Amino acid sequence: MINICKTQLNLLKSANSVQQQVRTTFVLKRKYEPLLHKTNEKPRRLRAKHFIYELVEDTQVKKRPNMEVVLKTFVEGVGDKGDVVSMKPHFVYNKLLLPGLATYKTPENIVKYSKTEAEKSTVQHSSAYAQRTVTMLESIVLAVIMNKDEPWVLEPWHIKASLRKAGFHCKEECITLPKESIEGPDLLKENKEFNCTITINKLEQATLKCRIHHWSTDPSERLPYVLEHWKLPAEPLLDRSQMEVSTTDGQQPII
Amino acid sequence: MLTLLGRMRALAVRQQTGEAFRCLHLTAVTEAARKGTREKARKKKVKVEVKKVGFIPHNQRDKKINVKRADKHVDDSWKQVPKDDVYVGRYYRWPVYTVAEAIQCHRETHHPSMYNVPNASLNVEIELNMQGEKATRFVDNFQRMAMIPHKFNHGEERKIIVFTKGNDEIVEAREAGATLVGGVELIKDITGGELLLSDYQFIIAHPNILPELVALRGLMKRKFPNPKSETLGVNLAEMIIKFSNGISYSATKDEYQQNFGLIKASVGTLDMDVQHLEENIRFLLQDVNTMRPKRDGRFITRVLLKSPPSSEQLKIDPFVYIPELYDKTAAKISREAKNEAEPAPQQALEAATASN
């Protein structure tokens, strides 16, 4: 009876479900090597000093190699669906495997999550980082510095040069200006806002807020500097329904 | 009454202690000996003086102490290479332009419709790894003159004095644009104090006047013409043109980072022909590369093209114009060629010094 009870108790006991992998391997080296023993004789007795060790390697602090996973969907900054990506193991576990964006790389998973023909034809993302570029382009207010004294007509390369000064690199053909031509110098257009469209990899489109600023070569002729002008609201330059005047929040300074 | 008694007793007790002391050894000899040993011991002790430092305002504190400075040699090779046609620069490697592209970019920003400075000067910033042959040795700051094929207005006043004997050479030097040309009479003027050598930045001489010129050695000091700095030679016109039109540049080591050197020089103006500007950059880079220490690795680490008033700096690849790494065989050949070319003026110099 007692025996049965005992076995029942053991059966009822829950098994430890959390099986954490523990790295307890330490590579050690003897500080004092024991002497060799004579042939056909017993090895010498080990002394206390022979049990002094020096640490060669601690596997717990070793850098883990990258992990390869198959992406289930498009992940911004990582890759497209079906891509096999190699990333740091912690990033893979926390950002890809736990949210269910990727699975372990196995031949079955590669086949399962590879892009179908239908998906290939409907391209949604041109590259892993295009969306980030779009959000960053849309978050800034670009200062387009134009001359106060010489006549000009705004052209794509003006925007290209202004973007380059602000740390964005693009090609001239990616820039689409508003249909109405913007001409100057016209101080009425000072600090007025207009939108132009940037097309990334001929696919993603970003609306870029631009403001005209007049600049004179002669320092005494220059307009007074407005502190943090990009944070202030601005009037639209062109009367269009598409021109949405930005609010002050969510903008990053670009000089 | 009681107090008086007390005092008496105290006196008696004191007397007793005095007697007890007298029993001890208190002679002058022992006293002296003990004094000596004490002195020795005192001398042995090194006094550690703790100086009290009052409050020093933050702006007056020594900036060299406890400041972690970022490495000035920027390495962005760990960053990605952009694949998109529009990208945010900060996440990727710096784009490397060709000289023509970089000039085109600067011309865009300096266009009349934007900054309206089409004739702005084009500046080059050359970053150097000043480490010498050993890790603890560094290349000294140097100042040089680079000869350029296409001259431009550098905006400096450069006075050149030329010493030569031959009449043809005097004419030649005058035509080349020397400020003052003369022979023995000029030397006499200088020794007489009628002419100040300090008014002239550059002193050039023909080897035929060397024996007389030695008299001015003390006045000229480091400016004394010598073939190494290319101020002594037969080809006067070429030297004068070099010193009047060349790019004068100096490499300075960073105050806090000894292995970082920087050269800032102007190579022309934006309205010059692109090919001409490129040639000037090529000659400047080749001249800088002659100062390369005999070690492996790069000497010139990065070259940036700038043009005021724009703050843009565009990286160009210098290794199109100069070898990237130290080539032992090439250095040897060039040194041998130099040695062969040099003896003639060197001998003349030695002969001149010997005659004096």
Image (cartoon, coloured by chain):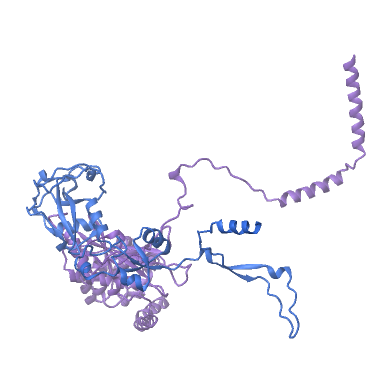
* Residue A49 versus residue A145 in the image, above or below: below
Residue placed furthest toward the front:
A1
Query: Quick check: can you spot residue B37?
Result: yes
Left or right, B81 with respect to A176, comes to right
Question: Closer to the camera, B26 or B278?
Answer: B278
Chain B as rendered: colour: purple
Residue B334: give x, y in percent of width and height: 35, 81
Q: Is residue A219 above or below residue B293?
A: above
Question: Which of the 4 image quarters holds residue B193?
Answer: bottom left
Image location (x, y in percent) of residue A131: 25, 58
Q: How many marks?
A: 0
Q: Residue furthest bottom?
A: A39
Please state which of residues B300 and A228 is positioned toward the viewer in this rendering: A228
- Which of A19/A170 is in front? A19
Name the image quarter holding residue A10.
bottom right
For residue B63, side relative to residue A168 (left or right) = right
Palette colour of chain A: blue
Q: Residue at x 39, y 59 (%)?
A: A98
Q: Position of residue B292 (x, y in %)?
A: 38, 72
